[in-house]
Amino acid sequence: MKVLVTGVAGYIGSVLTNKLLDKGFEVIGIDNLLYGGESLLSIYNHPNFKFYKKDIRNIETIVSLLNEIDAVIHLAAIVGDPACAKQPQLAISTNLDGSINLLKAANNSYSVKNFIFASTCSNYGKMEGNSYVTEESPLKPVSLYAELKVKFEEIMLDGEYHKNFCPTALRFATAYGISPRMRFDLTVNEFTKDAALGRELTIFGEQFWRPYCNVEDIANACILVLESEPDKVYKNVFNVGDTRENYQKKMLAEELKKLIPDLKIKYVKKDEDPRDYKVSFEKIKNVLGFQITKTVPQGMEEIIRVIKDNIISDPDNSRYSNI
Ligand SMILES: NC(=O)c1ccc[n+]([C@@H]2O[C@H](COP(=O)([O-])OP(=O)(O)OC[C@H]3O[C@@H](n4cnc5c(N)ncnc54)[C@H](O)[C@@H]3O)[C@@H](O)[C@H]2O)c1
């Protein structure tokens, strides 16, 4: 099976591609290398991997690559609220216009069966009261980043396609964990890095909830969709994570304190956060049999080791951040 992965050099794309190759898939990877391409060095010469430096905003340069592709996993985007707020036109042309053109081209190629879109639990904005949001809950995006994800999801799920085309939206929990393209602007990774470097943690709004999922498990969920029966995933939406892995920020700090007992934590009161949600991940478990393999405390342990072993010489470098 031949899979085209957009955003292949990114935090999730580089982990996913390693897994796809390990499982015997052929991978065509495209990326415009906003954060460099070093994440691809270890697979660059793999016989089943081919990289093309392409920008999804120039769809005409990508169309020919879609011949004989069985599935597209669409990760390329301007990622995160701050990055989209900083360059709104770039975010719109990439995350919305670029995605629409890619979707059309994938459908027009006729060989593509699965089209998996990387969406986000940020789409939910704020939960009602204290109840878990599900795939059926209203979407209340509070940033351009989430607005564009919601818009593209709607367009994708409403579209008309050739009869074997199967689009699926995956709403990922906030990712954490180790990747060839490390990101330290993600909450768990950032807190853990700072704690491992002996810094005091300053936590704004410790009461707010968010779900987290290891980057490896996010990659596993993408592959699970590829391997699922089309009628289970056709025009369907799944939250990706595990219901037990919803944490308040103070719970993250407490988990870190167990691993680094002399950690100092300063809580700064914040009464409002437009993003405060606990998410149910029962659907992906019940419909597709998805199980996570790692928990947040296990991910924290791994990151502490990476930092303490000096595997990353300058973890504060801006290359490890999308902000
Ligand atoms: N990391 C998370 O916590 C998280 C959570 C929910 C959803 N997602 C989604 O998952 C996907 C991957 O996220 P990530 O964390 O790996 O981000 P990332 O920023 O590490 O990776 C995105 C990749 O897309 C590439 N890219 C950007 N614009 C492009 C363009 N015009 N053409 C080609 N390539 C382009 C970048 O160079 C980068 O390598 C994104 O769609 C993101 O919205 C991520």
Image (cartoon, grey):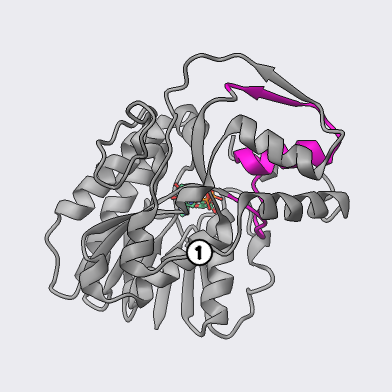
Q: Is residue 12 left or right of residue 57?
A: right
Quarter the N terminus occupies: bottom left
Residue at image mark 1 = 219
Q: Amino acid at mark 1?
A: Ala
Image coordinates of residue 42 in percent, x first then y, are: 69, 72
- Image quadrant in which you'd find residue 221: bottom left
Classify 10 Å Cα crowding around label 1: few (below 14), some (14-19), many (20 and above): many
Front residue of this view, candidates 82 and 300: 300
Residue 278 at x, y = what percent?
43, 38
Q: Residue at x 58, y 85 (%)?
A: 47
Can residue 10 be seen by looking at this rendering?
Answer: no
x then y, percent, for residue 159: 15, 56
Q: In the figure, residue 199 lies in which quadrant?
A: top right
Q: Which residues are magenta?
A: 176-205
- The residue at the point 80 percent across, 54 percent down is 306
| Residue 137 spot, x, y in % from top left | 26, 39
